[in-house]
Image (cartoon, grey):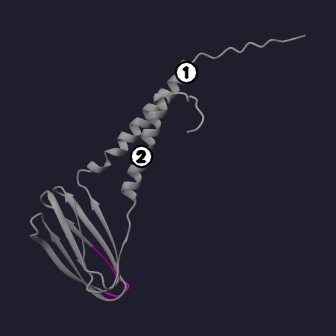
Amino acid sequence: MGGGGTAPKMKMSDALILTGVTILFGSLFMHAWVTPIQLNDEDPPYTNGASMMNGDVFVINIAVANESTVRYVLYDESDNIISAESVQIAGEGEHEKTFTISEGGYYTYEVDTKGVAATLEVDIERKYMIDMIPFPLGALLLAYGLYQREEDVSDAEPEVLDAELEA
């Protein structure tokens, strides 16, 4: 629906630079963006899970508004309880719980604050850092795109401008 016309083709170097920067920013957000989970007084126990490998670690940070007994439970793929622990936390207190995984699979964790408002942050620390692969991939694409752009600039012959001078 608009005017016709053509646009110049996108250079390969520009496409590589755009792809590399996009992967780098996406990876940064994937790793750095941790959204705290708000648990209200009337909420049921918070349950979530992830696919884990041998040696990976769940790190659960919780801050409660009032004194509470917080119950942590870790389940395996078959819903068998791997670990269960209750911790007394003082009002306005914080606690960090870590679960180290000894065998790969899908694990589910449950955090029960027993009717007390809380803020929960969950982080997964990977042993083999497979989730870090996008960083060098994005950097490699960006560097190659910048290299190609520099090569295109150095290969281009300077354009000679002829001027007609009238006396």
In the rendered image of this protein, does residue 81 appear above or below residue 42? above
Question: Considering only vertical position in the picture, is 101 above or below 84?
Answer: above
Q: Position of residue 134 (x, y in %)?
A: 34, 45
Q: Is residue 80 left or right of residue 120?
A: left
Q: Residue furthest right?
A: 167
Judging by the rendered image, the residue that carries numbered circle 1 is 154
Picture residue at 20% right of the left edge, 58% below the top: 51
Given residues 106 and 63, the one toward you in this image is 106
- Name the quadrant containing residue 137: top left
N-terminal of the pair, mark 2 or mark 1, is 2
At x 37% / y 55%, what residue is drawn?
Answer: 30
| SS at mark 1 in the image | helix
Q: Residue at x 60, y 35 (%)?
A: 3
Which span is picked out in magenta? 90-96
- SS type, badge 2: helix
What x and y, as percent, mark residue 139? Answer: 41, 40
**Residue indicated by mark 2:** 24
Whether 92 is among the magenta residues is yes
